[in-house]
């Protein structure tokens, strides 16, 4: 077996074992937690959230967009996913536009009032990612109507 | 490997998070967080919403209608916008639901079961207009942070419940009462049990109006979960954030209520007009009370193409916060000339009013039909986006639809 193939297989097995181990750990800790907190996971009907268990599926990028979150693929993406989507959806980020100062002030507001943690050295990377990919556009005082879907109106 | 997988897991740390990257500063992340990135729920079946509704945000849930979806005189659930600040409560047991009235300005705090409320007090039904304070935010320049609502964060449903003033009278309030503030069963996004997602309120004069309800029904049925089941405060004509959902406590305060999102800059606008982008100090921000005059063309949907010589019948709704709409007009020439629409009186105070008109076009081409309402105090909707404010509230600019005559 050549070295490359060997490495590839080891990596493959490593990934597989990793996911298996993770699943077992989650399962067992969940079970212990459930024993200690019987109400845990007794969700009512409205909560049917699904969870990605396959890390590779979660990593998919199509047309420069990270499919699972809708974020643009650029330097800092993984940090943004990890730090910005714990409390709120990615949509709350991607629908907003701000300058560097603007994004920083939003981060400060979240730290002061919404329990956002210290971002440390990653703050600069995250702010750069946001200011570059979600920068404000000049809209003027009233934009022209956009994205009109034309249709024939019969009586 | 390009990225290391990282597990953050403690025995009691609820679910461990597997992320496709390191969680840097993981020690600063409280245990129990599950990145929303891993969730993929379908809001339409979840909340019974029409597929044409726009989901702006899935944590917290924020979903809006489009103008043409709001054509019904009474908004059905499937077209009603959702604006949530926190997580919808789980496992609601109505038999154990208790409403407590407390605060500095009650003579003695008192609690009621839902059955008590229904049995003890007279029930009333009103159509009440609820519009998100940030409806239209997406048009502000420079942009304001938050959910980028376009035109669809407004509704007028039929609400049934008891008058807040009846229950406050039963409890007994002191003469120093200034404000009421609600508290509710929803939970904070961060998972912090000490934090309330939202706890707003209104001054006593609004709390004591006949139309201010503690409602159990919307459109003749139990209130849908996303809209506040089993008990919602409904305060028509004011920012819909005053209409607390899942309410379990109302405090009668001897000062302006100081709950979450009562303080600046939330649901406040500059007391004096400011230039676009200007920094405004917290103390110069004033609480929004009545919503401004506004209207929507709900038929036809924008993008209609008609044949030359055909009349276009338009219709929609208009509302004016605490006031009544006294005149409704449309323009097909970008405001150069205005023609009047027929406008109905409101079914009851604080209900939106219905208008209609038949529009003729002089020749082939591209047109926009603009609609403009005028309130009983003589104030009309602006054609441009109104005065900029830091949080992007109160955009009541004229609604317009595109039409081609061919």
Image (cartoon, rainbow, N blue to C red):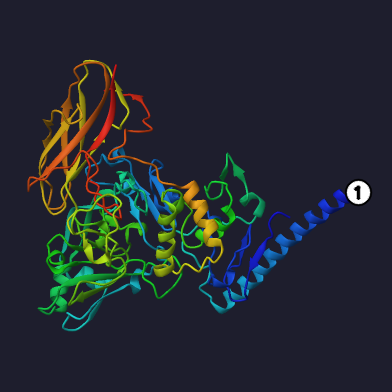
**What is the residue that sits farthest to the bottom in this orientation?**
B108
- Percent across and percent down for residue B16 are 61, 67
- Percent across and percent down for residue B50 are 38, 44
Name the residue nearer the viewer: A80 or A89.
A80
**Residue B120 visible from this viewpoint:** no
Name the residue nearer the viewer: B384 or B295.
B384
Residue appearing at x 29%, y 43% in the figure? B151
Name the residue nearer the viewer: B39 or B330.
B330
- Percent across and percent down for residue B120 are 18, 72
- Say above or below: A129 vs B380: below
Task: Write down the quadrant of residue A144 in the picture.
Answer: top left
In this figure, what is the number of numbered marks? Answer: 1
Relative to B35, is B159 on the left or the right?
left
Badge 1 is on which residue?
A2
Name the residue nearer the viewer: B56 or A72.
A72
User: Mark 1 falls within which chain?
Assistant: A
Quarter of the picture holding the N terminus of chain B:
bottom right
Residue appearing at x 24%, y 62% in the figure? B242
Relative to A137, is B319 on the left or the right?
left
Q: Which element type, helix, strand or loop, lies under badge 1?
A: loop
Residue appearing at x 22%, y 18% in the figure? B310
**Residue A51 visible from this viewpoint:** yes
Quarter of the picture holding the C terminus of chain B:
top left
């Amino acid at each position: 077996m050549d070295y490359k193939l060997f490495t590839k297989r080891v990596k493959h097995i490593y990934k597989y074992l990793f996911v298996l181990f993770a699943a077992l750990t989650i399962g067992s800790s969940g079970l212990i937690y459930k024993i200690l907190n019987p109400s845990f996971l007794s969700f009512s009907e409205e909560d049917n959230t699904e969870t990605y268990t396959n890390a590779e599926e979660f990593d998919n990028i199509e047309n420069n967009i990270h499919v699972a979150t809708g974020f643009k693929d650029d330097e800092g993406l993984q940090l943004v996913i990890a730090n910005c989507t714990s409390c709120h959806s990615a949509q709350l980020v991607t629908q907003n536009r701000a300058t560097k100062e603007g994004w920083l002030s939003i981060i400060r507001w979240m730290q002061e009032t919404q329990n956002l943690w210290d971002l440390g050295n990653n703050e600069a990377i995250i702010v750069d990612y946001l200011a570059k990919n979600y920068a404000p556009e000049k809209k003027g005082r009233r934009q022209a109507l956009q994205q009109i879907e034309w249709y024939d109106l019969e009586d | 490997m390009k990225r290391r997988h990282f597990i953050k897991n403690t025995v009691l740390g609820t679910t461990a998070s597997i992320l496709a990257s390191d969680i840097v500063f993981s020690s600063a992340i409280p245990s129990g967080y599950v990145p929303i990135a891993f969730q993929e729920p379908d809001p339409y079946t979840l909340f019974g919403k029409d597929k044409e509704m726009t989901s702006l945000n899935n944590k917290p849930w924020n979903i809006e209608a489009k103008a043409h979806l709001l054509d019904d005189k009474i908004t059905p659930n499937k077209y009603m916008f959702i604006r949530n600040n926190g997580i919808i409560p789980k496992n609601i047991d109505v038999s154990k639901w208790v409403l407590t009235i407390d605060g500095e300005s009650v003579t003695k705090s008192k609690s009621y079961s839902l059955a008590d409320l229904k049995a003890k007090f007279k029930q009333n039904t009103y159509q009440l207009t609820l519009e998100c304070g940030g409806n239209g935010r997406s048009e502000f320049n420079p942009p304001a942070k938050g959910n980028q609502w376009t035109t669809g964060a407004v509704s007028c449903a039929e609400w049934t419940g008891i008058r807040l003033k009846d229950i406050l009278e039963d409890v007994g309030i002191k003469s120093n009462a200034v404000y009421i503030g609600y508290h509710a069963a929803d939970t904070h996004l961060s998972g912090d049990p000490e934090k309330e997602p939202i706890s707003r309120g209104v001054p006593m004069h609004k709390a004591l109006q006949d139309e201010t309800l503690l409602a159990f029904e919307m459109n003749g049925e139990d209130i849908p979960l996303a809209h506040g089941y089993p008990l919602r405060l409904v305060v028509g004509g004011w920012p819909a954030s005053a209409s607390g959902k899942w309410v379990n406590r109302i405090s009668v305060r001897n000062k302006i209520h100081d709950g979450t999102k009562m303080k600046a800059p939330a649901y406040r606008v500059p007391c004096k007009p400011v230039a676009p982008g200007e920094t405004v100090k917290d103390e110069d921000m004033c609480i929004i009370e009545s919503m401004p005059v506004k209207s929507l063309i709900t038929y036809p949907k924008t993008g209609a193409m008609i044949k030359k010589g055909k009349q276009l019948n338009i219709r929609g709704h208009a509302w004016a916060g605490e006031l009544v709409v006294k005149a409704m007009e449309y323009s097909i020439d970008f405001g150069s000339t205005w023609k009047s629409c027929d406008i109905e009186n409101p079914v009851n105070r604080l209900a939106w009013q219905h208008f209609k008109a038949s529009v003729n076009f002089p020749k082939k081409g591209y047109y926009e039909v603009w609609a403009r309402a005028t309130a009983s105090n003589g104030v009309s909707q602006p054609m441009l986006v109104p005065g900029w404010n830091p949080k992007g509230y109160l955009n009541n600019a004229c609604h317009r639809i595109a039409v081609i005559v061919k």
